[in-house]
Image (cartoon, helix red, strand yellow):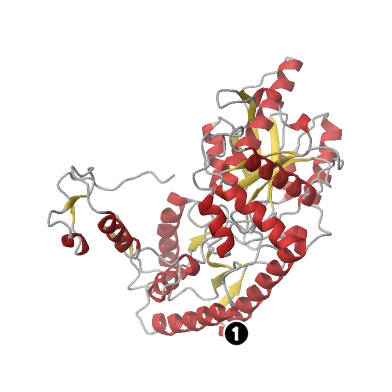
Amino acid sequence: MVISSTATESNTLLNSTFASRYARTALPRFRMPNASIPKDAAFQIINDELMLDGNPRLNLASFVTTWMEPECDKLMMDSIAKNYVDMDEYPVTTELQNRCVNMIAHLFNAPFGDSETAVGVGTVGSSEAIMLAGLAFKRKWQNKRKAQGKPFDKPNIVTGANVQVCWEKFARYFEVDLKEVKLREGYYVMDPDKAVDMVDENTICVAAILGSTLTGEFEDVKRLNDLLTEKNKETGWDTPIHVDAASGGFIAPFLYPELEWDFRLPLVKSINVSGHKYGLVYAGVGWNVWRSKEDLPDELIFHINYLGADQPTFTLNFSKGSSQIIAQYYQFIRLGFEGYKNIMENCMDNTKMVKEGLEATGRFEILSKDAGVPLVAFALKDNSQHTVFEISETLRRYGWIVPAYTMPANAEHVAVLRVVIREDFSRTLVERLLTDIKKVLTEIDSLPSRTSSKTAHVTAGNEVKSTADGHRAVEKITGYWKKQVDRKKTSGIC
């Protein structure tokens, strides 16, 4: 949810040329109009404004799926009126969700037999899934501390500074201390050794990321598991691991099947994944799967019967649409393992093409790794004259949305661009993007430097500052942009 900060003067009006075919009176923008208008006019007014939005297919900032097959689109529209929470009224939808949970659990090598049912939930996205996983860890830790007669008021989670903002939300909303392992230049994921050093008796879990938002890199969950196992033996603790596989959960099983990151590791107790990212479903679906029933405390599950039957539920939301659940099941049976594998391989081929094209310019350093989420994170080799923020801004004139951002602590001085490769990003679009990036480089090269010793300016509010030291000027500009990025953290680029 975006909190509205738009001015709402009551006398602001909405004028539309098309509406004049039906009525000459302008509509109020921030108050409900007194009278109805024809459906054609309402449609045209809204459609006209939406034309000014960016093109989702050219939004290379987002991991979220922007294309599905027409058959699936129709299934989603046909089920749009179904309230997912009403399990008694829509039992088939509930069954499809259960099938999805079990398919995902098997994909992640959960240790349960063919006759057993996996433990998991469908969510609005990975943010909700992470909140639920965090609550389960917190409650289980509190119950154990209470039984031992020990204090249970200062829980903490250990993560890398590269975590998505939803982890900060969980920590703040549910009063858990977030202990972040700082990054360093050249190493932009959580260091397992440093993470385990930060673990104490109040640590409810260590959160590892399979597919960092910043660079797409997979964190070393296997080493984290081994180090944490040794520490647990030494201390008598049983600190577990949660894997945030929002981006990489639907990539690793198909491209890196030998990589141990999932329930094959004993300390991994829960995993979240975004169906609306590389699960290939439109925005609005995530999943959380637990290793076993013992890892999800019973007191967190609510039982309701006022919709017609006893219905267990573990969710932060209540009413929500069924369309994304149905779409996820469609993709699973439509594509199968082979189909997902082909799509992910194609995405990686296009990623390689983008990387090679950027390297061919001689202007960029590639920061992302070959193994990981199909994206390319890259920085200017020389930012003494121009910055990645200028490139991002200029690319928008060609229709491309390519985010520029600075790394978290302690690598704030590193500013990068990132291109996410999705299924609908074709080879032709790759070629067009590379052509447009070359045009942008030529264009900004012809402009005066924004970071030179005499012309460097950083605007903050109404203040304009300059410095005679070119190096300090670059730092000030990076600092300004970091403030802009920090206001959104990584929530705006995932």
User: Which residue is identified by label 1?
Assistant: 360
Residue 169 % position (x, y): 53, 39
Query: Horizontal placement of 87 versus 114: left or right?
Result: left
Circle 1: element type:
helix
Residue 105, above or below 445: above
* Residue drawn at x 69%, y 61% as measured from the top left: 334
* Residue drawn at x 45%, y 81% as measured from the top left: 441
Residue 429 % position (x, y): 53, 78
Q: Quadrant of the C terminus?
A: bottom right
Residue 242 % position (x, y): 71, 42
Farthest top residue in view: 149
Residue 160 % position (x, y): 64, 48
* Residue drawn at x 28%, y 48% as measured from the top left: 6
Crowding at dot 1, Cα within 10 Å, few <14 / some 14-19 / many 20+, comes out as few
Q: Amino acid at mark 1?
A: Ala
Q: Give the camera-side residue of 381 and 72.
A: 72
Q: Quadrant of the N terminus?
A: top left
Query: Horizontal placement of 300 versus 53: left or right?
Result: right
Query: Horizontal placement of 458 versus 346: left or right?
Result: left
Farthest left residue in view: 24
Question: Is residue 415 at all visible to an observer of this figure?
Answer: yes
Question: Is residue 189 at all visible to an observer of this figure?
Answer: no
Q: Give the camera-side residue of 453 and 22.
A: 22
Residue 354, above or below 101: below
Q: Give the camera-side residue of 75 and 485.
A: 75
Report the number of numbered marks.
1
